[in-house]
Amino acid sequence: MPAFRTVRGMRDFLPRDAERMRHVEQVSRELAQLYGYEEVITPVVESYDLLAAKAGEEIRKRMFAFEDLGGRKVALRPEFTASMARLMATKMRNEPKPIRLFSVGSLYRYDEPQYGRFREFWQADYELLGSTRPEADAEILMLTNDLLKKLGLRNYSFKIGHMEILRGILSQEGVGEEQQNRIMQLLDKKRWDEALTVVRSAGVSQNCVATLKKIFGTKGKEAFRVLKDAEESVMEYEKSVAAVKNLREILELTIKSGVELDVMIEAGFARGLEYYTGMVFEPYISEIEMALSGGGRYDKLVELFGGESIPAVGVAQGVDRIVLAMKKQRCPPKIAKEKKVLVIPVNEEYVAKAMELSSLLRSAELIVEVEVMARTVSKALSDADRRAAAYAVIIGPAELTEEKVVLRDMIKREQKIVEIKDLCKEILRRFM
Ligand code: AMP
Protein backbone atom coordinates (compact mmCIF):
# COMPACT_ATOMS: atom_id res chain seq x y z
CA MET A 1 0.00 0.00 0.00
CA PRO A 2 1.32 3.52 -0.75
CA ALA A 3 1.53 5.94 2.21
CA PHE A 4 -1.61 7.96 1.80
CA ARG A 5 -1.53 11.72 2.14
CA THR A 6 -4.26 14.33 2.15
CA VAL A 7 -5.31 15.47 -1.31
CA ARG A 8 -3.60 18.70 -2.41
CA GLY A 9 -5.22 21.74 -0.80
CA MET A 10 -7.00 19.63 1.84
CA ARG A 11 -5.92 19.58 5.47
CA ASP A 12 -6.15 17.40 8.54
CA PHE A 13 -6.77 19.30 11.75
CA LEU A 14 -4.93 17.60 14.60
CA PRO A 15 -6.40 18.12 18.08
CA ARG A 16 -4.84 21.53 18.92
CA ASP A 17 -5.73 23.01 15.53
CA ALA A 18 -9.18 21.47 15.53
CA GLU A 19 -9.71 23.03 18.95
CA ARG A 20 -8.82 26.49 17.63
CA MET A 21 -11.17 26.13 14.66
CA ARG A 22 -14.00 24.96 16.88
CA HIS A 23 -13.35 27.78 19.32
CA VAL A 24 -13.84 30.39 16.58
CA GLU A 25 -16.90 28.49 15.44
CA GLN A 26 -18.28 28.40 18.97
CA VAL A 27 -17.75 32.13 19.59
CA SER A 28 -19.37 32.85 16.20
CA ARG A 29 -22.38 30.76 17.17
CA GLU A 30 -22.72 32.45 20.56
CA LEU A 31 -22.52 35.83 18.86
CA ALA A 32 -25.23 34.77 16.41
CA GLN A 33 -27.46 34.01 19.38
CA LEU A 34 -26.69 37.37 20.99
CA TYR A 35 -27.81 39.16 17.83
CA GLY A 36 -30.83 36.93 17.17
CA TYR A 37 -29.45 35.06 14.13
CA GLU A 38 -30.98 31.59 13.91
CA GLU A 39 -28.80 28.73 12.74
CA VAL A 40 -29.65 26.80 9.58
CA ILE A 41 -27.84 23.87 8.00
CA THR A 42 -27.84 23.59 4.23
CA PRO A 43 -26.20 20.88 2.09
CA VAL A 44 -22.59 20.96 0.95
CA VAL A 45 -23.74 19.68 -2.46
CA GLU A 46 -26.04 22.06 -4.35
CA SER A 47 -27.12 22.35 -7.96
CA TYR A 48 -24.39 23.80 -10.14
CA ASP A 49 -26.77 26.32 -11.64
CA LEU A 50 -27.74 27.75 -8.27
CA LEU A 51 -24.12 28.15 -7.18
CA ALA A 52 -22.95 29.45 -10.55
CA ALA A 53 -25.74 32.01 -11.01
CA LYS A 54 -24.03 34.97 -9.39
CA ALA A 55 -20.82 33.69 -7.90
CA GLY A 56 -18.65 35.61 -10.33
CA GLU A 57 -16.31 34.22 -12.96
CA GLU A 58 -13.41 33.78 -10.56
CA ILE A 59 -15.29 31.47 -8.21
CA ARG A 60 -17.34 29.85 -10.98
CA LYS A 61 -14.30 28.44 -12.71
CA ARG A 62 -12.90 27.14 -9.42
CA MET A 63 -15.90 25.14 -8.32
CA PHE A 64 -15.63 21.43 -7.53
CA ALA A 65 -18.35 20.62 -10.07
CA PHE A 66 -19.34 17.14 -11.19
CA GLU A 67 -22.20 15.03 -12.42
CA ASP A 68 -23.74 12.83 -9.73
CA LEU A 69 -24.73 9.22 -10.49
CA GLY A 70 -28.21 10.42 -11.42
CA GLY A 71 -26.76 12.68 -14.12
CA ARG A 72 -27.41 15.94 -12.23
CA LYS A 73 -24.87 18.71 -12.57
CA VAL A 74 -23.91 19.54 -9.00
CA ALA A 75 -21.07 21.24 -7.14
CA LEU A 76 -19.60 21.53 -3.66
CA ARG A 77 -20.66 24.91 -2.32
CA PRO A 78 -17.99 27.60 -2.75
CA GLU A 79 -19.91 30.02 -0.48
CA PHE A 80 -23.04 30.20 1.64
CA THR A 81 -25.01 33.11 0.28
CA ALA A 82 -26.53 31.28 -2.69
CA SER A 83 -27.90 28.55 -0.37
CA MET A 84 -29.30 31.14 2.02
CA ALA A 85 -30.95 33.04 -0.83
CA ARG A 86 -32.39 29.73 -2.11
CA LEU A 87 -33.96 29.11 1.30
CA MET A 88 -35.47 32.58 1.28
CA ALA A 89 -36.84 32.17 -2.23
CA THR A 90 -38.43 28.82 -1.37
CA LYS A 91 -39.03 27.30 2.07
CA MET A 92 -38.76 30.50 4.07
CA ARG A 93 -40.50 32.81 1.64
CA ASN A 94 -43.50 33.35 3.88
CA GLU A 95 -41.61 34.00 7.08
CA PRO A 96 -42.10 37.48 8.51
CA LYS A 97 -39.23 39.88 7.87
CA PRO A 98 -36.62 40.67 8.96
CA ILE A 99 -35.01 37.26 9.03
CA ARG A 100 -31.63 36.74 10.60
CA LEU A 101 -29.83 33.54 9.58
CA PHE A 102 -26.55 32.02 10.68
CA SER A 103 -24.68 29.05 9.27
CA VAL A 104 -21.24 27.62 9.72
CA GLY A 105 -19.49 24.93 7.72
CA SER A 106 -16.98 23.99 5.08
CA LEU A 107 -16.71 25.42 1.59
CA TYR A 108 -14.75 24.31 -1.45
CA ARG A 109 -12.84 26.28 -4.07
CA TYR A 110 -10.17 24.95 -6.40
CA ASP A 111 -7.86 27.84 -5.47
CA GLU A 112 -4.07 27.59 -5.72
CA PRO A 113 -3.09 26.42 -2.22
CA GLN A 114 -0.93 28.90 -0.30
CA TYR A 115 -0.77 30.58 3.10
CA GLY A 116 -4.35 31.48 4.03
CA ARG A 117 -5.81 29.96 0.88
CA PHE A 118 -7.10 26.42 0.95
CA ARG A 119 -9.34 24.26 -1.18
CA GLU A 120 -11.46 23.37 1.82
CA PHE A 121 -12.08 26.18 4.29
CA TRP A 122 -14.67 27.25 6.83
CA GLN A 123 -16.91 30.26 7.16
CA ALA A 124 -19.32 31.51 9.79
CA ASP A 125 -22.02 33.22 7.77
CA TYR A 126 -24.56 35.81 8.93
CA GLU A 127 -27.38 37.08 6.70
CA LEU A 128 -29.90 39.78 7.57
CA LEU A 129 -32.79 39.64 5.11
CA GLY A 130 -35.71 41.97 4.57
CA SER A 131 -34.30 45.44 5.22
CA THR A 132 -32.86 48.07 2.91
CA ARG A 133 -32.11 50.36 5.82
CA PRO A 134 -28.61 51.53 6.74
CA GLU A 135 -29.09 50.16 10.26
CA ALA A 136 -29.07 46.64 8.77
CA ASP A 137 -25.69 47.31 7.11
CA ALA A 138 -24.45 48.90 10.32
CA GLU A 139 -25.53 45.82 12.30
CA ILE A 140 -23.43 43.55 10.07
CA LEU A 141 -20.38 45.79 10.52
CA MET A 142 -20.96 45.95 14.26
CA LEU A 143 -21.36 42.20 14.54
CA THR A 144 -18.12 41.57 12.63
CA ASN A 145 -16.31 44.05 14.85
CA ASP A 146 -17.71 42.27 17.93
CA LEU A 147 -16.58 38.88 16.70
CA LEU A 148 -13.00 39.94 16.05
CA LYS A 149 -12.88 41.76 19.39
CA LYS A 150 -14.30 38.79 21.31
CA LEU A 151 -11.65 36.54 19.82
CA GLY A 152 -8.97 38.86 21.15
CA LEU A 153 -7.78 40.33 17.82
CA ARG A 154 -6.29 43.84 17.86
CA ASN A 155 -5.56 46.63 15.40
CA TYR A 156 -7.82 45.36 12.68
CA SER A 157 -9.32 47.76 10.20
CA PHE A 158 -12.27 47.64 7.85
CA LYS A 159 -11.83 48.33 4.17
CA ILE A 160 -15.21 49.66 3.07
CA GLY A 161 -16.70 50.66 -0.24
CA HIS A 162 -19.98 50.63 -2.15
CA MET A 163 -20.59 48.69 -5.37
CA GLU A 164 -22.96 51.30 -6.77
CA ILE A 165 -20.28 54.00 -6.86
CA LEU A 166 -18.62 52.24 -9.81
CA ARG A 167 -21.65 50.46 -11.20
CA GLY A 168 -23.64 53.72 -11.09
CA ILE A 169 -21.08 55.37 -13.35
CA LEU A 170 -20.87 52.39 -15.70
CA SER A 171 -24.64 51.92 -16.05
CA GLN A 172 -25.23 55.57 -16.79
CA GLU A 173 -22.56 55.26 -19.51
CA GLY A 174 -24.47 52.34 -21.00
CA VAL A 175 -21.97 49.59 -20.07
CA GLY A 176 -23.85 46.26 -19.96
CA GLU A 177 -23.97 44.07 -16.88
CA GLU A 178 -21.65 41.41 -18.25
CA GLN A 179 -18.95 43.90 -19.02
CA GLN A 180 -19.46 45.54 -15.67
CA ASN A 181 -18.90 42.16 -14.01
CA ARG A 182 -15.70 41.71 -15.99
CA ILE A 183 -14.51 45.15 -14.89
CA MET A 184 -15.34 44.38 -11.24
CA GLN A 185 -13.39 41.10 -11.42
CA LEU A 186 -10.31 42.94 -12.69
CA LEU A 187 -10.64 45.66 -10.07
CA ASP A 188 -11.04 43.04 -7.35
CA LYS A 189 -7.62 41.76 -8.41
CA LYS A 190 -6.23 45.33 -8.53
CA ARG A 191 -5.66 45.10 -12.29
CA TRP A 192 -6.66 48.75 -12.79
CA ASP A 193 -5.17 49.25 -16.26
CA GLU A 194 -6.82 46.18 -17.72
CA ALA A 195 -10.11 47.27 -16.17
CA LEU A 196 -9.75 50.67 -17.84
CA THR A 197 -9.05 49.02 -21.20
CA VAL A 198 -12.34 47.12 -20.93
CA VAL A 199 -14.10 50.35 -19.91
CA ARG A 200 -12.70 52.20 -22.93
CA SER A 201 -13.64 49.40 -25.30
CA ALA A 202 -17.24 49.74 -24.11
CA GLY A 203 -17.32 53.17 -25.79
CA VAL A 204 -17.73 55.35 -22.70
CA SER A 205 -17.18 59.11 -22.54
CA GLN A 206 -13.82 60.76 -21.77
CA ASN A 207 -15.39 62.09 -18.62
CA CYS A 208 -16.22 58.56 -17.49
CA VAL A 209 -12.61 57.36 -17.77
CA ALA A 210 -11.38 60.46 -15.94
CA THR A 211 -13.97 59.99 -13.19
CA LEU A 212 -13.10 56.32 -12.73
CA LYS A 213 -9.39 57.13 -12.46
CA LYS A 214 -10.18 59.71 -9.81
CA ILE A 215 -12.38 57.25 -7.93
CA PHE A 216 -9.67 54.57 -7.92
CA GLY A 217 -7.47 57.01 -6.04
CA THR A 218 -10.17 58.19 -3.63
CA LYS A 219 -9.35 56.37 -0.43
CA GLY A 220 -8.22 57.02 3.09
CA LYS A 221 -8.84 56.70 6.78
CA GLU A 222 -10.65 60.00 7.29
CA ALA A 223 -13.96 58.52 6.19
CA PHE A 224 -16.03 61.66 5.80
CA ARG A 225 -13.33 63.58 3.94
CA VAL A 226 -12.94 60.67 1.51
CA LEU A 227 -16.70 60.45 1.01
CA LYS A 228 -16.87 64.17 0.29
CA ASP A 229 -14.14 63.82 -2.35
CA ALA A 230 -15.95 60.84 -3.85
CA GLU A 231 -19.22 62.75 -3.98
CA GLU A 232 -17.59 65.64 -5.79
CA SER A 233 -15.98 63.28 -8.31
CA VAL A 234 -19.22 61.48 -9.21
CA MET A 235 -21.47 64.55 -9.17
CA GLU A 236 -22.79 63.82 -12.69
CA TYR A 237 -23.74 60.24 -11.93
CA GLU A 238 -26.98 60.15 -9.99
CA LYS A 239 -26.80 56.55 -8.69
CA SER A 240 -23.21 56.96 -7.59
CA VAL A 241 -24.11 60.08 -5.61
CA ALA A 242 -26.87 58.09 -3.89
CA ALA A 243 -24.36 55.31 -3.14
CA VAL A 244 -21.95 57.73 -1.45
CA LYS A 245 -24.86 59.13 0.57
CA ASN A 246 -25.88 55.61 1.62
CA LEU A 247 -22.34 54.79 2.72
CA ARG A 248 -22.19 58.02 4.72
CA GLU A 249 -25.45 57.13 6.50
CA ILE A 250 -24.16 53.65 7.38
CA LEU A 251 -20.91 55.02 8.78
CA GLU A 252 -22.59 57.85 10.70
CA LEU A 253 -24.93 55.37 12.29
CA THR A 254 -22.11 53.01 13.21
CA ILE A 255 -20.08 55.78 14.78
CA LYS A 256 -23.08 57.28 16.62
CA SER A 257 -23.80 53.82 18.04
CA GLY A 258 -20.48 54.06 19.85
CA VAL A 259 -18.74 51.40 17.76
CA GLU A 260 -15.09 52.28 17.35
CA LEU A 261 -14.31 51.12 13.84
CA ASP A 262 -10.96 51.73 12.26
CA VAL A 263 -11.99 52.21 8.64
CA MET A 264 -10.27 52.60 5.34
CA ILE A 265 -12.72 53.93 2.78
CA GLU A 266 -12.01 52.96 -0.81
CA ALA A 267 -14.42 54.49 -3.28
CA GLY A 268 -13.14 52.16 -6.04
CA PHE A 269 -13.41 48.98 -3.93
CA ALA A 270 -14.97 46.10 -5.86
CA ARG A 271 -15.60 42.55 -4.70
CA GLY A 272 -15.53 39.62 -7.09
CA LEU A 273 -18.90 38.15 -6.17
CA GLU A 274 -21.40 39.50 -8.66
CA TYR A 275 -24.41 39.69 -6.39
CA TYR A 276 -23.29 42.66 -4.30
CA THR A 277 -25.38 45.77 -4.86
CA GLY A 278 -24.44 48.11 -2.02
CA MET A 279 -21.95 48.56 0.81
CA VAL A 280 -19.09 46.04 0.73
CA PHE A 281 -16.36 45.49 3.30
CA GLU A 282 -13.43 43.35 4.38
CA PRO A 283 -11.58 43.42 7.70
CA TYR A 284 -7.77 43.15 7.72
CA ILE A 285 -4.91 42.97 10.19
CA SER A 286 -1.51 44.31 9.16
CA GLU A 287 0.24 40.95 9.80
CA ILE A 288 -1.72 39.17 7.03
CA GLU A 289 -2.32 40.55 3.57
CA MET A 290 -5.57 38.71 3.04
CA ALA A 291 -9.06 39.69 4.16
CA LEU A 292 -10.30 37.91 7.27
CA SER A 293 -13.94 38.11 6.18
CA GLY A 294 -16.04 39.50 3.38
CA GLY A 295 -19.43 41.07 3.47
CA GLY A 296 -21.90 43.38 1.84
CA ARG A 297 -25.38 44.12 0.61
CA TYR A 298 -27.07 42.03 -2.06
CA ASP A 299 -30.59 43.22 -2.79
CA LYS A 300 -31.32 41.27 -5.99
CA LEU A 301 -30.22 37.70 -5.30
CA VAL A 302 -33.35 36.25 -3.69
CA GLU A 303 -35.46 37.55 -6.53
CA LEU A 304 -33.10 35.96 -9.05
CA PHE A 305 -33.85 32.57 -7.49
CA GLY A 306 -37.56 33.05 -8.02
CA GLY A 307 -38.51 34.60 -4.73
CA GLU A 308 -40.05 37.97 -4.12
CA SER A 309 -37.74 40.92 -3.96
CA ILE A 310 -35.99 40.65 -0.59
CA PRO A 311 -33.15 43.02 0.17
CA ALA A 312 -30.31 41.54 2.20
CA VAL A 313 -26.96 42.22 3.75
CA GLY A 314 -24.53 39.67 5.15
CA VAL A 315 -21.02 38.66 6.02
CA ALA A 316 -18.93 35.51 5.72
CA GLN A 317 -16.31 35.32 8.46
CA GLY A 318 -13.32 33.31 7.28
CA VAL A 319 -12.73 30.92 10.18
CA ASP A 320 -9.34 29.64 8.90
CA ARG A 321 -7.92 33.11 8.36
CA ILE A 322 -9.23 34.32 11.72
CA VAL A 323 -7.38 31.40 13.32
CA LEU A 324 -4.20 32.40 11.44
CA ALA A 325 -4.68 36.01 12.60
CA MET A 326 -5.11 34.85 16.20
CA LYS A 327 -1.89 32.89 15.96
CA LYS A 328 -0.02 35.88 14.46
CA GLN A 329 -1.22 38.14 17.26
CA ARG A 330 -0.67 35.42 19.84
CA CYS A 331 -4.27 35.59 21.01
CA PRO A 332 -4.93 32.93 23.61
CA PRO A 333 -6.92 30.08 22.10
CA LYS A 334 -9.27 30.59 25.08
CA ILE A 335 -10.01 26.95 25.36
CA ALA A 336 -11.97 26.34 28.52
CA LYS A 337 -9.76 24.95 31.23
CA GLU A 338 -10.28 21.26 30.98
CA LYS A 339 -11.89 19.66 33.93
CA LYS A 340 -10.30 16.35 33.20
CA VAL A 341 -10.13 13.45 35.62
CA LEU A 342 -8.46 10.07 35.17
CA VAL A 343 -10.16 7.10 36.79
CA ILE A 344 -7.74 4.29 37.54
CA PRO A 345 -8.63 0.86 38.98
CA VAL A 346 -5.74 -0.74 40.89
CA ASN A 347 -6.40 -4.04 39.14
CA GLU A 348 -8.86 -5.82 36.90
CA GLU A 349 -11.27 -6.53 39.74
CA TYR A 350 -12.10 -2.83 40.05
CA VAL A 351 -12.67 -2.06 36.38
CA ALA A 352 -16.45 -2.22 36.62
CA LYS A 353 -16.41 0.13 39.61
CA ALA A 354 -14.13 2.49 37.65
CA MET A 355 -16.62 2.52 34.77
CA GLU A 356 -19.47 3.16 37.19
CA LEU A 357 -17.68 6.07 38.87
CA SER A 358 -16.72 7.55 35.49
CA SER A 359 -20.44 7.82 34.63
CA LEU A 360 -21.10 9.49 37.94
CA LEU A 361 -18.37 12.08 37.34
CA ARG A 362 -19.51 12.73 33.76
CA SER A 363 -23.02 13.40 35.00
CA ALA A 364 -21.41 16.30 36.90
CA GLU A 365 -20.04 17.63 33.56
CA LEU A 366 -16.50 16.51 34.30
CA ILE A 367 -14.31 15.17 31.49
CA VAL A 368 -13.33 11.65 32.43
CA GLU A 369 -10.87 9.20 30.93
CA VAL A 370 -10.91 5.68 32.31
CA GLU A 371 -7.73 3.63 32.33
CA VAL A 372 -8.30 1.10 29.53
CA MET A 373 -4.78 -0.31 29.18
CA ALA A 374 -4.70 -2.31 32.44
CA ARG A 375 -1.54 -0.46 33.43
CA THR A 376 -0.30 -0.25 37.00
CA VAL A 377 -1.40 2.80 38.95
CA SER A 378 2.06 4.35 38.82
CA LYS A 379 2.30 3.86 35.03
CA ALA A 380 -1.17 5.31 34.50
CA LEU A 381 -0.35 8.28 36.73
CA SER A 382 2.85 9.03 34.90
CA ASP A 383 0.75 9.44 31.75
CA ALA A 384 -1.65 11.87 33.46
CA ASP A 385 0.44 14.97 32.71
CA ARG A 386 0.54 14.25 29.00
CA ARG A 387 -3.22 13.80 29.09
CA ALA A 388 -3.62 17.16 30.86
CA ALA A 389 -5.62 15.63 33.67
CA ALA A 390 -5.90 17.71 36.81
CA TYR A 391 -7.06 14.87 39.07
CA ALA A 392 -6.92 11.12 39.28
CA VAL A 393 -9.38 8.92 41.11
CA ILE A 394 -7.79 5.66 42.22
CA ILE A 395 -10.03 2.73 43.07
CA GLY A 396 -8.69 -0.05 45.25
CA PRO A 397 -9.86 -2.67 47.76
CA ALA A 398 -9.06 -1.00 51.05
CA GLU A 399 -11.05 2.13 50.36
CA LEU A 400 -13.89 0.48 48.47
CA THR A 401 -15.01 -1.60 51.40
CA GLU A 402 -15.76 1.74 53.05
CA GLU A 403 -17.19 3.35 49.88
CA LYS A 404 -14.14 5.55 49.56
CA VAL A 405 -11.57 6.28 46.82
CA VAL A 406 -8.26 8.08 46.57
CA LEU A 407 -8.40 11.51 44.97
CA ARG A 408 -5.05 12.70 43.70
CA ASP A 409 -4.29 16.29 42.74
CA MET A 410 -1.98 15.89 39.75
CA ILE A 411 -0.64 19.42 39.93
CA LYS A 412 0.12 19.61 43.65
CA ARG A 413 0.99 15.90 43.69
CA GLU A 414 -1.03 15.38 46.87
CA GLN A 415 -3.72 12.88 47.58
CA LYS A 416 -6.44 12.20 50.09
CA ILE A 417 -9.19 9.70 50.73
CA VAL A 418 -12.68 10.89 49.77
CA GLU A 419 -16.09 9.30 50.33
CA ILE A 420 -17.70 8.34 47.00
CA LYS A 421 -20.85 10.24 47.89
CA ASP A 422 -18.77 13.46 48.17
CA LEU A 423 -16.51 12.82 45.18
CA CYS A 424 -18.24 15.00 42.53
CA LYS A 425 -18.75 17.85 44.96
CA GLU A 426 -15.14 17.71 46.07
CA ILE A 427 -13.71 17.76 42.52
CA LEU A 428 -16.05 20.49 41.34
CA ARG A 429 -15.20 22.64 44.35
CA ARG A 430 -11.50 22.30 43.53
CA PHE A 431 -12.11 23.26 39.90
CA MET A 432 -13.93 26.48 40.86
P1 AMP B 1 -15.65 35.47 -0.05
O1 AMP B 1 -16.71 34.40 0.12
O2 AMP B 1 -14.79 35.28 -1.24
O3 AMP B 1 -16.22 36.83 0.11
O4 AMP B 1 -14.65 35.27 1.17
C1 AMP B 1 -14.98 35.57 2.49
C2 AMP B 1 -13.90 35.08 3.39
O5 AMP B 1 -13.79 33.66 3.28
C3 AMP B 1 -12.51 35.56 3.04
O6 AMP B 1 -12.27 36.82 3.62
C4 AMP B 1 -11.64 34.50 3.64
O7 AMP B 1 -11.45 34.70 5.02
C5 AMP B 1 -12.45 33.25 3.44
N1 AMP B 1 -11.97 32.54 2.25
C6 AMP B 1 -12.37 32.67 0.98
N2 AMP B 1 -11.71 31.83 0.16
C7 AMP B 1 -10.84 31.14 0.96
C8 AMP B 1 -9.85 30.12 0.74
N3 AMP B 1 -9.63 29.60 -0.48
N4 AMP B 1 -9.15 29.67 1.80
C9 AMP B 1 -9.37 30.16 3.04
N5 AMP B 1 -10.28 31.10 3.32
C10 AMP B 1 -11.00 31.60 2.29
Image: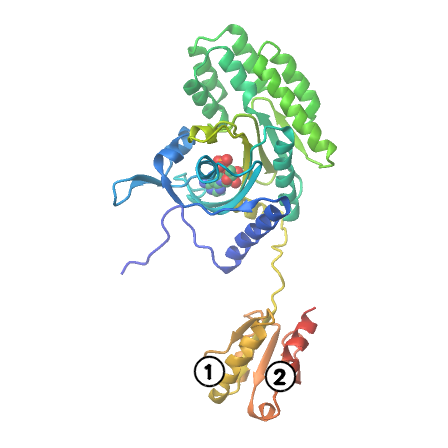
User: Percent position (x, y) of residue 149?
Assistant: 66, 45
CA gap between label 1 and label 2 equals 22 Å
Amino acid identity at mark 1? Ala
Using the rendered image of the protein, determine whether residue 291 is visible from the camera's viewpoint. Answer: no
Label disc, if present, on residue 420 of the rendered structure = 2
Please give the name of the residue rendered at 64% of the width and 82% of the height, measured from the top-left corner: 421
Q: Quadrant of the N terminus?
A: bottom left
Residue 171 drawn above or below residue 424: above
Kindly indicate the quadrant of the structure image that contains residue 387. Answer: bottom right
> For this rendering, which residue is in front, 190 or 373?
373
Please give the name of the residue rendered at 40% of the width and 30% of the height, measured from the top-left corner: 53
Residue projecting furthest to the top: 206
- In front: label 1 or label 2: 2
User: Percent position (x, y) of residue 400?
Assistant: 58, 90
User: Percent position (x, y) of residue 249?
Assistant: 67, 25
Kindly indicate the quadrant of the structure image that contains residue 132. Answer: top right
Count neighbours of disc 2 (C-alpha within 10 A) and say few if under 14, some if 14 to 19, many if 20 or more: some
Q: Which residue is mark 1?
A: 374
Count neighbours of disc 1 (C-alpha within 10 A) and say few if under 14, some if 14 to 19, many if 20 or more: some
Using the rendered image of the protein, determine whether residue 268 is visible from the camera's viewpoint. Answer: yes
User: Percent position (x, y) of residue 351?
Assistant: 49, 84
- Point out the tag, 1 or 2, that comes first from the N-terminus: 1
On screen, residue 416 versus residue 321, left or right, reads: right
Q: Quadrant of the C terminus?
A: bottom right
